[in-house]
Amino acid sequence: MDKVLQRLLELQSVDVRLSDVSTRLARFPKKLAEVDGRVAAAKADVDVTKASQLTAIKDRKKYELDVEQWKERVRKYKDQTSQVKTNEAYRALQHEIQMAEDEIAKAEDRLLEQMVAGEEYDRRIKASEKTLKEVEAVAGAERSKIETEKSKAEKEQAQLNSERETAIAEIPENLLDHYTRIAKKHNGIALAEVRDEKCSACGMMIRPHVIQEMRRSDNDEMYHCETCTRILYYIEASTSAAPAAASASASSPSEI
């Protein structure tokens, strides 16, 4: 195989792995956001419950004040009963006293409801705070694992970028541009192996004389698939092709 073509295959192998690493790196922000989202939701649940408890406490104080105000009215009306001169005035005061006592009963019922609600909110707050701690513990472990995987992927990316620089150093600039244009068109796969007289990427038959030319040891011409335009390469069955194998696996039949 031509030396430059071999360099292109090595470059494609690196680019395929770089693409995979980049895809993995792109997922990490979402994974971290999901972890943070679960913690935020648990915190929000605690905050909402505490806010509801605070409202219940304010309402309870209001009803306590209502009870005291109505009791004060009852005392006032009862004091006035000893001062009235007529039965009509006495009956009117008795009516006011009864109304005030009814309001006291209503306010005390509401007060009792708020006291029961307050106990329920205490229970819910303890439960939600316990849940929050559990969620934070799990989130901490997940976040640590994600950060470790992210760091590993970043190191792998840096290593591959270094390998890519080494690979492109031996490729002519015009050929590198040509490779880049084709790779961009075909999801990063610019080269395709000829297998069973077909382009392994798109499945199109390759002309017999082209295959014969590609098999010549002294041939240095570059051939392209007439259908998908990818750069073609041919590996004799007895030839070891470790670098090509990685690229070939990535360039299995796909879109044209």
Image (spheres, rainbow, N blue to C red):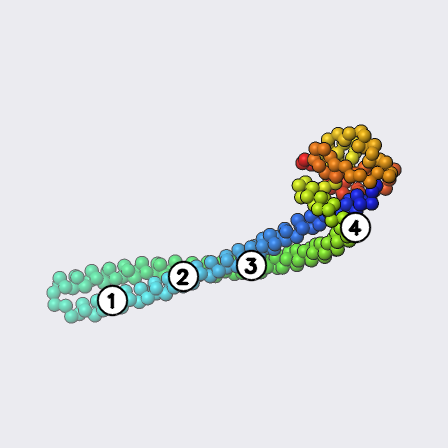
Alpha-carbon span between mark 1 and mark 4? 100 Å
Q: Which mark is residue 55?
A: 2
**Residue 180 falls in image quadrant:** top right
In the rendered structure, the answer to whether residue 196 lies left or right of residue 53 reads right
Kind of residue sitting beneath label 1: Arg
- State the SS at label 4: loop
Label 4 with label 2: CB-CB less than 8 Å: no
Please tell me which residue is depicted at 66% across the width and 52% down the height of the picture.
25
Alpha-carbon span between mark 4 and mark 3? 57 Å
- Picture coordinates of residue 178, whole percent (x, y): 71, 44
Residue placed under numbered mark 4 in the picture: 170
- State the SS at label 2: helix
For the C terminus, the image quarter is top right
- Picture coordinates of residue 27, whole percent (x, y): 63, 51
Residue placed under numbered mark 3 in the picture: 132
Please tell me which residue is depicted at 76% across the width and 50% down the height of the picture.
168
Alpha-carbon span between mark 2 and mark 3? 22 Å
